[in-house]
Amino acid sequence: MKRNIIILLIAACVGVTLYINSQTKRLPDAVKQRAEQLLLADALFPARPVWWEDDKILAVGVVAERTNGEQAARKACELFTAENLPVGGLRIEVYDILEIQRNDEWTLIGKAVCNAN
């Protein structure tokens, strides 16, 4: 009896996970590529974005000595809004790229959430 209950619980967990994943909206690759192109074209962002996480978080690197992390995050959102990219709700996280390269320290220096367009 216990075995049947455990199997039923595992099946229910798998079913819920599959349902949640099927309902999650993903950003199209073309949108992600365009976002990366916009960031690379701006001198404030000297390197390719560090990572995308589940199409909900975009981590970017800046030189912290030359810019404010919060302003850089808002600037990224503004770039996307100006291009009408559908990235509403995307969280931008900003890290010091030099600190990552020198010491492998990932310290968050700024963040912003892009508004829905």
Image (cartoon, rainbow, N blue to C red):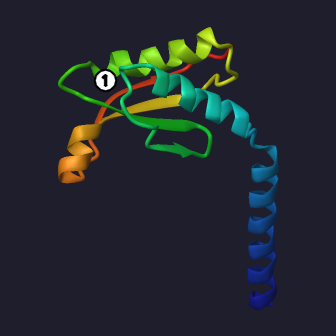
Q: Quadrant of the C terminus?
A: top right
Q: Is residue 92 left or right of residue 61?
A: right
Q: Residue at x 31, y 23 (%)?
A: 69
The residue lying at 75 percent from left, 73 percent from top is: 9
Kind of residue indicated by mark 1: Gly
Q: Is residue 27 visible?
A: no
Q: Which residue is mark 1?
A: 69
Q: Is residue 102 above or below residue 115?
A: below
6 left or right of 33?
Answer: right
Residue 102 in the image: above or below residue 13: above
Secondary structure found at label 1: helix
Q: Position of residue 55 (x, y in %)?
A: 62, 40
Q: Residue at x 76, y 50 (%)?
A: 20
Expressed as whole percent of the image width and height from the top left, the position of residue 27 reads 70, 36
Residue 24 appears at what percent x and percent y? 75, 43
Q: Which residue does the image show at 80% across and 90% down from the upper left?
A: 1
Between 110 and 8, the one nearer to me in the picture: 110
